[in-house]
Image: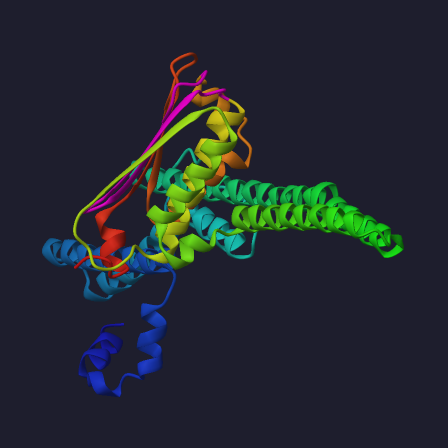
Amino acid sequence: MAKALKELEQTPLQNIPPNFILRLLRMPLLLKVLLANSIIVGIGAFVGTWLTTFVSGGDEHFTSGLALFLTIIGFLFSGLVNYAVLRAAFQPLSELQQTAGAVRNGDLKARIKRSLVADHQTEELANTFNTMLDALEERNQQLRATAAQIIKAQEDERTRIARELHDETAQSLTAAMVRLKFLEKSSNIDDLKKGLNELRAILSKTMDEVRELSRNLRPSLLDDQGLVAALESYIQIISERLPSKITFQHKESDHSIRLPEMVELVCYRVAQEAITNAIKYAQATKIEALLTIDSKVTLSIKDDGTGFNTEKTYEKAGLGLIGMRERAQLVSGSLHISSKPGNGTEIRLEIPLQYLKDTGYIQ
């Protein structure tokens, strides 16, 4: 053994195959610690036995043989004990590796089981990993629920558009065709003039209905003149058709360019949804809309309606409140809802300075 160690010491480092060194370095941690501890115990047994017999003046051959025997026994015993202890100590890490592999293969329900032999740090690591998986699974469930609600909302919107086209536009066009057939058979000038006037009124009403439908789907003012003009036009149209009093104010610092397109669209849809909810569900008689544009964009919609319990309502919310929150997140914004039963509601959208910087709106 001493001869082998001497030969190993005399071997130049560059003559050791690099693949051998790489394999040693890439050994599992359990085997690295096991091998290191076993070597230390074996060397300790050999040196301790040799020193003991040397000091006591024993026979040299007997000393070497005994030292070698005790070294082998110590190496084997150390290996067995270390393997049992290290196997138990590294079991939580093996569990972590298996769970991570299961998650990588698509099993998001895999979790690390609690271990009785895990130390505090390993247990904290396992708990953190499980918590991360729980949050990931919850987020996926929210995404699936949101996707389902979006699909349902799209279908509901298509149903609404189809109903409006059938109940209003189609009926108006049908009435126009009936009038045209009547005029074809009429030879009286007065009847023709009267019929043409009625036909003109029907077509004018139909054009207004189509414009209203188009405006609700995508307001042209939002693309042409920006957010402020689109909100002013929307609120004016709503105020003319409904008894609710709606006021709109805007404050903005001196900027020569418009807000980013996505910011304008999010603000418009949030305002549209908030005003619709205030009128339709809260029976509000007074609604105040305020848009502030400076270092950040703030949109506030207040009403004097019936109000609601925000926690219970949001738990059962459809696409309304959830949709507004999702839209706010698209522009790194936040949506704050303040409401109590009987005390009205305030919905406030805030889009931070950083998003405006990232999109180049402000320097």
* Relative image position of residue 265 (x, y in whole percent): 41, 50
* Relative image position of residue 182 (x, y in whole percent): 85, 50
Range drawn in magenta: 282-306
On whether residue 338 falls in the magenta region, the answer is: no
Q: Which residue corresponds to the image point at 40% horizontal and 47% vertical from the top-left?
A: 230
How many marks do you count on the picture?
0
- Asked where in the image residue 130 lies, by quadrant, the reply is top left
Furthest toward the front, the residue is 189
Furthest toward the bottom, the residue is 15
- Asked where in the image residue 284 lies, by quadrant, the reply is top left
* Relative image position of residue 143 (x, y in whole percent): 52, 45
Position of 21 relative to 203 (above/below): below
Any part of residue 113 in sight: no
Q: Which residue corresponds to the image point at 42% horizontal and 12% vertical from the top-left?
A: 342
Position of 242 relative to 12 (above/below): above
Q: Quadrant of the N terminus?
A: bottom left
Position of 49 relative to 191 (above/below): below
Any part of residue 4 in sight: yes
Q: Is residue 255 left or right of residue 98?
A: left
Residue closer to the observer: 136 or 347: 347
Q: Quadrant of the C terminus?
A: bottom left
Residue closer to the observer: 255 or 114: 255
Magenta stretch, main secondary structure class? strand
Q: Is residue 13 left or right of residue 78?
A: left
Furthest toward the right, the residue is 185
Q: Is residue 200 left or right of residue 53?
A: right
Q: Which residue corresponds to the image point at 81% horizontal and 54% vertical from the top-left?
A: 180
Residue closer to the observer: 224 or 298: 224
On whether residue 305 falls in the magenta region, the answer is: yes
Q: Which residue corresponds to the image point at 44% horizontal and 48% vertical from the top-left?
A: 96
